[in-house]
Structure formats: C-alpha cells, structure tokens
Image: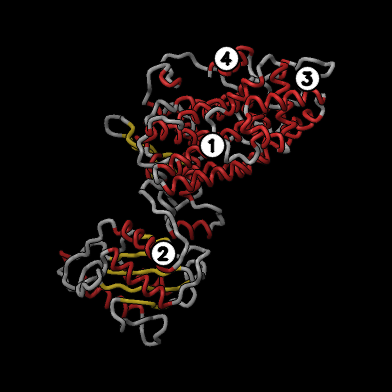
Amino acid sequence: MVPDVHDMGTRTIGLLFYLYGPGRAEEHIDPHLVAAWDDLAPDPGRHPDATHSDLQRLLDQPVEALPKAARPSKHVWHLSVRAAPEDPILSDEQWAAIAHRMVAATGIAPAADTAGCRWAAVRHADDHIHIIATIVREDGRQARLRQDGSRAQAEARQIEIDYGLRRLRTGDGTAAQRPTSAERHKAERQGRERTAREELRETVRRAVAGSQNEGEFFERLASAGLLVHKRVAPSGDLLGYKVALPDDRNKDGEPVFFPGARLAPDLSLPRIRERWTTTVSPGHDGDGVSADAPQRSVPGPASARRAATTAAWQAVLVFDGGDDGVISAHIAAAGEVLDALAKTSAAHTRTQLGAAAVAFERASRSHVRAARGHDRTLRQAARDLVHGGPALGRGEDGASTAMLIDMAFFLVTAAAAWHGRKEHAQQAAAALQAAEHLRVAYQAAAGHPMAVLHQRGRLLPPALQRRHAAVLREAVPELAEQVLAEAGWPALASTLADAEAAGHDPAELLVQATGRRELDTASSVSDVLVWRLRRLAGLPADASATPLPGNSTAQPSRSHTNGPASTRQDDRNRVRGH
C-alpha cells in the first residue's frame, strides 16, 4: 500500500472538483465519499441535493473562523492511498477504516481527539482513495503534521499486515522523488512512456557517468539535447544547475526546469562535485591517480569493456571486508558503469542493460556516505566505456560485452548482499532487480561467443579433454562434478586449452578464478569461469579466429588478442600475484 502526501494547496473547492470530476483521462468512475470527520457530511457523488460547495464550506469553516491575518496561506492537505496491483479489491467499509487510521497516524485527526481537523475520503477507483483535509483544527490551532509522510508510510506497513496485503519495503529517505500524478497525466496526454522527470534523471545520470569535471558534465548534457540553466553567484561561482526537455512546456509555453536535487539526491551539483574533487593518495587501494598523470589514450569498445571487467573484479574484492564508506563509493561507481554500458550497448542488449541501470540507480544511494576517491578505477572504466564509443554486437566487441555483463552481475549481486546485511531493504531489492536484467542481457550477449567456444571444446582431442577434466578435479574439487555436468563444460575445456597454449598454468588460473568468490547465484558456473579465465589469461573474448589447441595448427594466433602486449603481460602478472 502506497500513501503519498501531496503538496499543500490553497483552494479546497478546486481539489474537490478534481476528486469528484471525470479525471484528466476520464479515469474517475463513481466518485463518492467513503468516510469523513462527520458521518453526516454531504456527499456530492451520491446525494442529489449535495454540492461541492456544501462540502467545501463545511471543511473550510475552522479556517474561515480565524481572523484573516491568522489564516495559513496554504491550508489544504491531500493524501492519496493506493493498493498494490496484485492486492484484492477492498470494500468501501475497508477503505473507510483505512482512512480513519491514516488521519489518526498523520496528525490530521488523532484518535479520541474531538478537536481534530475536518477531512473527507473520496473513492473514485477500485484501487485507491484520496483524503482531503483542512489543517486548522476545531480549536483554532494548526495540526502538527511534522513527518506526516513517514508516519503515513509506517501506518501503511501495519495496514498491509492487518489486511493481508502485499508487504512493501520501508524507505529510508534516500529515494529519488517520484513523479507527481500531474506529471504522469501530462506524460499520458503527450504520449510519452515516461514522465519528463524520469527521462531527465536518466539523461543526467548518464552524463555524470565517468565525467571528470564540470565542463565535461555540462557538455554532455548539452549534447544530449537538454536545456541547461546554470545558477551563478554574483562572484561568478557556479552554485547549481537545472535542466529541461526542449518539448516539455508549461501552460505559458515556457520550459519546465528541474534542479538536479529534485531529480535525485545525488544529482545536486555539490554531490556531483564530490566525484571530481575527492582523491586518495596514489597507490592507495590501487585507485589513486595523481593530478598531473599523463592523459590516457582512448580505448576501443572491446578494450574498454575488458578494462571495465577488471575494474569490476577488483571492486568485488572490496566487498570481502572493506570499509563501508569505500564499499558505498564502489556501489555508486558501479551505477556509473551500468549507465555507460547501457549507453554504448548494441541493440539486442540495450533494453535490458538500460533497465538494469535504471533499477540499480535506487541501490546506489543509502545513508552510508561514500568515501570518494577509492572508486576512481570504476569511474575511469565508465569514462572509457563512454569515450570508447558504441560496441558492435559481434566479434570481440560482442564477446567482451558478455564478459563485462557477467562480471557486472556478480558486482551487483555483491551490492545486494551488502545492502541486505545493512538492512537497506529497498536498495537490496533494487540491486537484485538489476541483477535479473543483467542475467537476461547476458543471455542475449553471450549466445554466439559461447557457441563458438562450445563447438571448439567439442573438437578438442579426447585425450586433451580428459586431461583438462583431471585438472579441473584437482584444482577445484568442490566444483568439478557440477561443472563437468553442465552444458557449458566444453566451452570451459576450450578456454583451459587456450590458456595452456598461451603459456599459463590452467590449474593456477582456476584457483585464482574461484578463490573467495561466491558462485551460488550463477546460472552456469562454467560460463562464469570461462570469462574469468579469459580475462585473467589475456585471451581474446572472441575465440572464433583462434586456432584450436591440439591440432596441427598448434599455437593460437596472437594477432587477435585484445590490447597491446604490455597489457596482456600485466594480466598474466596479476594471475601470478593477484
């Protein structure tokens, strides 16, 4: 059950006309009163002689009784209470009881308080009611409505238990502001799938992803087609910003601007600046970068994906026992990587990756303050993904995308587990939702490259297949029989053979790939090990151009290995000393 306290209003009659009217899209059906402060209150929906003005005058009487100078400028309180889609349809009597509980919990009409505010609950749909109240009590004092939204949420959680409704998770105040009903209706009228607020939030988040300074951030906003207005102090210092969609206008034809903080708490300019200004000492946690470091060359899409995979792997290590602030920073930076990956993905993975990024956005914010600077490697990976450009859905681009999605799944799952331990219910649920989208995206991305590896594994000489099965049993006996029974074992056998032909110890690689890394959430352990081994050994993600080990063509071609020789050697050094 979702209660939503709306902005205070000035005209009781205006809200009543809306509640009893047809709605913006003729969606209001049979509007009528289900409860009120007085059982004899007139109902314009059911009583033929009652009018909107009759109900308005009665609601406003305590306000009108005050001297004009003492009347609050905004006196109309409005709460909507909506059931979940899967909940049963509640009766008018049940909604009336819920309304009484809500006005008592929020301070509008506390239980047993005969001098509370006047209110009325209107139902014009099966799944929700609206409660309108005037905030001046019968005794002339104003209602104490401090934290009325939080109290409504707490009461909703208890109502869900009492009525056997879907149990929603309690928020912690870090969620982005939801679109208002007016924004949703406006989007429907304009034929938009999302509200302007939601579209702007996603666009700004993608502009932030991997950006290194204000100039780059605002340049990305402009390149995305947004209208940008900067708030500048008399001194010339930049204080803030707001953005608008060019075609989102108010009734006067002016653009509707949203400040960054109204899109999401971490999109205000001060919070964004934290990502640019906070640094750690070079070499600390492997993430420090000196201010005068030389400019890095822009990698191609496949190289950027391999680097991001390594950065994600290093971030997973942090969850093994890192400081909460450092973990929080890595979770936020992981959101930037997902935003950048969605922005540069091929068409067949774009929808699911975009959905994963949107879902994980909620998981990237909590009350644990991020220790910025430690997340520099992940943020650089996001930047490289953006500047590397769109990836093709085939060849090394497509295969390295599958590799990155696979590792991102484990990073997101680790984030979900951490949030769960911290009792961050909404964040944990959002991370798990993102993981499911990544699982689907992986299946789309990995189909062709895994089929190539699977076919190569089937073509390995039987003696070589048996030898690598023995290596598997010796290196990871606790996983061996499960992996050998999976459909993906031939692909792993092919990868073990490629790694050995490239001069690596397959057993050592297996130990490195499985050590201290949970694999319980993997749909296919063999798939996970394929990508981890190919990354650790510096093997090309796309094996289609690599000669098959054990045949007369002997050694695999090095010309298709992704990245320069020094990068491959660095990978091998990490295998030996990781």
Distance of mark 1 from mark 3, alpha carbons? 35 Å
Q: Classify mark 1: helix, strand or loop.
A: helix
Distance of mark 2 from mark 3, alpha carbons? 62 Å
The residue that disc 3 covers is 549
Q: Say whether disc 1 or disc 2 marks the residue closer to the N-terminus.
A: 2
Which amino acid does the dot numbered 1 rest on?
A: Leu
Q: Classify mark 2: helix, strand or loop.
A: helix
Which amino acid does the dot numbered 2 rest on?
A: Ile
Observer able to see residue 325: yes
Q: Nearer the viewer, residue 19 or 418?
A: 418
Residues marked 4 and 2 touching at CB (< 8 Å): no
Compared across the picture, whether 429 is left or right of 241 comes to right
Residue 546 image offset from top left, x and y in percent? 76, 21
Q: How is the image coloured?
A: secondary structure
Check the image and name the residue furthest to the bottom: 49
Q: Image point 71% across, 25% down: which residue?
A: 470
The residue that disc 2 covers is 161
Disc 2: CA contacts within 10 A as few (<14), some (14-19) or many (>=20): few
